[in-house]
Amino acid sequence: MFAPITLRVAAGGVAVVMGPSGVGKSTLLDGIGGHLAHGFLAQGRVLIADRDVTALPAETRRIGVMFQDALLFPHLSVGDNLAFGLTPTLRGRSQRRAAVEAALAQAGLAGMYLRDPATLSGGQRARAALMRTLLAEPQALLLDEPFSKLDASLRAEMRQFVFDHARARGIAVLMVTHDPEDATAAGGIVVEL
Amino acid sequence: MSRGRALRGLVLGVVGLGLIAPIALGLGQSLQAAFGILPALDLRVWSLEPWRMLLAQPGFGSSLQLSLLTGLGSTLIALVLALGFCAAGSFGRGPGRLRWLAPFLAVPHAAMAVGLAFVLAPSGWIARGLALAFGWNRPPDIASVHDAWGLALMLGLVVKELPFLLLVIASGLAQLPVARQIAAGRALGYGPGVAWIKLILPQLWPLIRLPVWVVLAYGLSVVDMAIILGPSNPPSLAVAVVRLFSQPDLAMILPASAGAMLQAALVVVCIAALWGAEAALRLLGRWWVPRGGRGMSWAPGLRLASGAVWALMALASLALVSLLLWSLAWRWSFPLIWPESWSAAAWASPSATWGAALYNTVILAAASTAVSLALAVLWLEAEADLPRAPWAEALIYLPLLMPQIGFLYGLNVWFLRAGLSGGYLAVIWAQALLVFPYVMITLSEPWRSVDPRLLRVAAALGAGRWRRLLGLRLPILLRPILTAAAIGVAVSVAQYLPTLFMGAGRIATLTTEAVTLASGADRRVVGVYASLQAALPFAAYAAAALLPMWWHRNRRDLRGGGV
Amino acid sequence: MRFPLFAALSLLLATPAMADWSQTLAEAKGQTVYFNAWGGDARTNAFIAWVSTQTEAQFGVKVEQVKLTDTAEAVTRVVAEKAAGQDQGGSVDMIWINGPNFLAMKEQGLLHGPFVASLPNAQYLDLGPASAATVDFTVPVDGMESPWRLAKFVFSYDSAKVSETPETMAGFVDWAAAHKGRMTHPDPSNFIGATFLKQTLIELAPDPAALQQPVTDAAFAAATAPLWAWYDALRPNLWQAGASFPASAEVQDQMLNDGEVDISMSFDPASTAAAIKAGSLPDTARVFVPKAGSIGNISFVAIPYNAAHQAGAEVVANFLLDPATQAHMQNIEVLGSFAVLDAGKLDAAAQAEFAALPTAPALPALADLGPVLLEPHASWMTRLVAEWAQRYTK
């Protein structure tokens, strides 16, 4: 689709991919994340902290994804959504519960463990989705136009929230966007496809 | 990727060996017998004699004509009414708009036929109403059931197939942007009904084509309903063939097999004709649509179709109520509208009467549904990382398009050779042949409409294949899975010929008992069996509707409507 | 000198038989007999269920009724098993059978036996050469099937609606003309429908003796000519102008109950009384038989050659012939079917048991039923049904 590219994102850094619709931005993210639908062939390699994950299935790559929709699992409570993401290395029922409650509090969702995700506001949902992703302790994060469905005021706030958390945990972020403001705010490399 | 391929291979193997091969083998066996080869009777020479014997059967031509008329007629009437009903917008909106269909979908053909027979008979409910009005003291001497034209049979088929077609059309419509396109059409000055026909129908047809074929194939080869409602002298081809198979003169197996092959050919020819008609209509549409007629005069016709649908469903309701009433009546003679004395005697001793049949029915339904559901889930899961295989999906429909009488006798011979006949296993197997396709049809659309990004998110969170399936996909799909299970149960409960042939008659179910007893005297006992037969799938439907509602009571996004 | 020899001989003859029977009983213990019997009659089904409880308690043999819509289904099943080479362990253990089905199975070698003479209770049967228990539709039974109930052709009607009934089969023509559309008969592909035609054939045939021989073209043409003339006169006045027929006598009973017709027919003289008791016919229903008598035969049970539980089936066949079983069966409150035993061979206690059975207004006494007319040779029925279908199926 597009010309071969090489992209290197530092831990805690943000790279932005921009380009017109249909050029294959999302496909690029799918390829990196290991989600390519059949019929697509990716050539190249994906390295995470010098670990070659190209041949690995998505679930073992440790690359988180977020889309413009929060995509909370509709059959689970808000807290259980986060617990779904929480890394299995953390054991013990009460410890896991505590980790989730802490993450909820960080996202301004304290006390909402048992809530139906469908009853959250747009901003709450987006923050819950980010916390779910972060609890899985990814080494990289792929953002596919993550803020495009939020209204203008929420957008800036959410952007800040995501970048701050990624930076704090040393997660490399690759973002696909249409919005030049996203690119400016990211303050990292910008690639035009 | 290779895991997906292995899974698909496994599922294809199971479907191929378990479902397709038996049909092919059974068909092969019957085909041989149709041309004179029947080693059991020491017949080993090819000959056309079976066909000559078949043609020489008294009333053969009438039987064939009757099958064609009732099969094609009922399918076309049901289709036109269902389309008219939808075009008139009679479905309304809202999640519960299809729920009223459930009882009509659930009730097996035989139970509906028994009920209708009572409503329509010369001494039936309708006649009793007229008797009250006109002071008759004897039932009229008219053939309102078992009529030579097969009109009662056709009516029965229409009543039973309408709900199915409505459901199929509704689920097809759910995939189309109907409201917006109709709005666009109306903005251009088209009547809503004609906008539906010109804009929606051409997109809808490919989605409902196969189910319509299934209805056609069923109508052409129905046995249980034809025994209860159809003419007997001569009966429709399928019944005539079943009768030939059960003649004391064993040589009759030869013309019976030829008849079974003819029945299969009849289905093929009629489907081909429908296909041809579709092509012709498409050409006609190319001429008709650009003419730009706004069709404002269509509305009354469409309202008429809607009215007919409601009238038929009212008739079906009467039929179902009559089953229950009869099961509780003691004396109920003509021209009384209501039983004169009541008794629970017919229900009273389940251990001597309906207990065992209910037990067998439940076991068979549970087993064949579980097998089919597991197979469908594996099939659809294998789809996750492989392209869809339309040819394989078409194969799934084969058992629904193939008349059962075409392969059951031959299949039974093979099962006997393998030492499988007469047991639960053989019946479950034969039923799963027919349950699996319906489960697949019901489940595939909801399965494919799960947002793939949800699964990607889950994978990115470290959830492997099985956790994504068990922890995410299946719980989200709880409602459609239970709906598919309920339909599976309904299909299994309704099976007559497969249970009869494969169970060597030893495994009595509510359906085999109801059809057997329908040839007996005691309508009250038939009422018990038919009521139970209708109640069982209905209970399954109710559970499929209520269970997810309770389970997801705090999950707004999963409390949707649907049947 | 001669007396001991005779005793020794009879001992020789008797002992192995008795030994065989105890061996059969031992073998049968724990078996489940799949009794393939037409299932359209709830009372018969209940009787078979009762038999199962008795045989299980007395001999450890369970009876599972395989309810058939048509006896030929069981025949077909045995044929299919033979086709598949399953010569042992077959699924059909016992069949309620007669006439053409018996003939077909006997001719194809699909039956186990002869076994009747070895049943201990066969001592109560009249097994003489001319007895109804040894000839089934003129086909010699040869011990290949065991009798269990008596069948005799009767008509039923509602005495509240019909005052006069035909006295002869010929009389039906006038009756139907006077009561247009109020009479029909089951489709002749059904056993009772065929019997209606046979009953008339016996009455009208110029030489009834010819009916006891296998049918020939010439004999058929000669014997049936008056029958078809009679039928052509009758048919236009039948229910629905003779264009359509109930599938079975049970359906016709239901039509009688619904008032759609005024006459029905049965092969069981007690069925009308039984139906009244069950609420499925009006209290005023009664039975009549043509003055000259009606066709009678005996229902049998046969055991397929490949039956999985032959010993169990023999035990059940024997139990069915037990005088106590037969008396229970003849009880109008149970089944009301007349016993097949030879009353002269019963002891006083058994005879008293029969005499003490309850009665009912609609239950005819054996004497009211008139003479028993012998079934024609089985080939006549097949031919008659085919010819009827040729003539009247369009």
Image (cartoon, coloured by chain):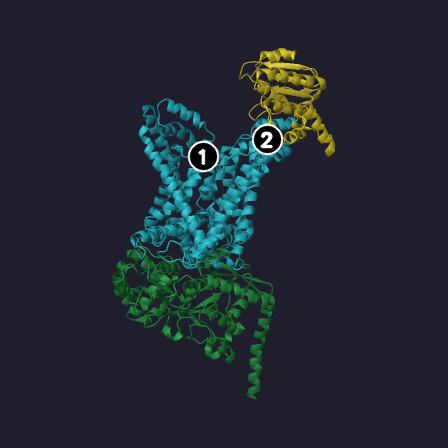
Chain colours: A yellow, B cyan, C green
Residue B552 or residue C140, whichever sits in front: B552
Which of the pair B141/A22 is nearer the observer?
Answer: B141
Q: Is residue B205 above or below residue C104?
A: above
Residue B197's disc number:
none
Q: Position of residue C144 (x, y in %)?
A: 48, 68
Looking at numbered disc 1 in the image, what kind of residue is underneath it? Ala
Q: Nearer the viewer, residue A22 or B389?
A: A22
Q: Which residue is mark 2?
A: A74
* Residue under label 1: B170
Q: Residue furthest bottom?
A: C1
**What distance separates the C-alpha of mark 1 from that of mark 2?**
25 Å
Q: Amino acid at mark 2?
A: Pro
Q: Position of residue A72 (x, y in %)?
A: 61, 27
The answer to whether residue B266 shows anywhere in this view is: no
Viewer-side residue, A59 vs B44: A59
Disc 1 is placed on an element classified as: helix
Q: Residues within 10 Å of mark 2 (few under 14, many from 20)?
A: many
Label 2, secondary structure: give it: loop
Q: Kindly indicate the quadrant of the structure image that contains residue C310.
A: bottom right
Labels 1 and 2 touching (C-beta < 8 A): no
